[in-house]
Image (cartoon, rainbow, N blue to C red):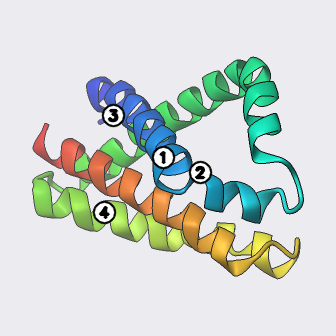
Amino acid sequence: MINLIVAVAGGIVAMVVGMLWYGPLFGKKWFSLAHPGADFEKMKTEGQKSMMPSMAMMFLANVVLSGVLSYFVSAMGGGLYIGLMTAFIVWLGFIATVGLSNVLFEGKPKELYLLNMGCQLVTLLIVGAVAGIL
């Protein structure tokens, strides 16, 4: 069963992790890899105005992702260990593999892939832990 509390909480968790990951933790590194040659400070001020629709869509996508993960964790019996293992397996089997196409076919740097996949893994592990506990 999908746990709606986990789904919404997971959407919030994903946004918070993303803001930290792509902000103070790795923001400049991510920007230099994703937008080579662009001015970070200029894009930062101009981009904030147009980010709200994208952030709203990402929140909804993360609510869906968290809801589906909560379903898988529940189907596996729940618990912290099950939540963490299910999150890792979902990340490895669906997120990390699909994201690899950005490196293989779009010519994105492997460092960008690792940075993005790290954020996804941390987010899913947190959501999986919450899903396992609730």
If the image is split into quadrants, where does the C terminus sit? top left
Q: Secondary structure at mark 4?
A: helix
Q: Which residue is mark 4?
A: 86
Q: Which residue is mark 2?
A: 27
Q: Nearer the viewer, mark 1 or mark 3?
A: 1
Nearer-the-camera pick, 44 or 22: 44
Q: Which residue is mark 3?
A: 2
Q: Which residue is mark 1?
A: 24
Q: Secondary structure at mark 1?
A: helix
Label 3 vs label 2: CA separation? 33 Å
Relative image position of residue 31 (x, y in whole percent): 71, 54
Q: At 51% from the left edge and 72% from the top edge, which residue is drawn?
A: 93
Label 4 vs label 2: CA separation? 28 Å
* Vertical relation: 114 (above or below) 133: below
Label 2 vs label 1: CA separation? 6 Å
Label 4 vs label 1: CA separation? 29 Å
Q: Is residue 39 left or right of residue 100?
A: right
Relative image position of residue 49 (x, y in whole percent): 76, 18
Nearer-the-camera pick, 38 or 97: 38
Image quadrant assignment for residue 33: bottom right
Label 4 vs label 3: CA separation? 14 Å
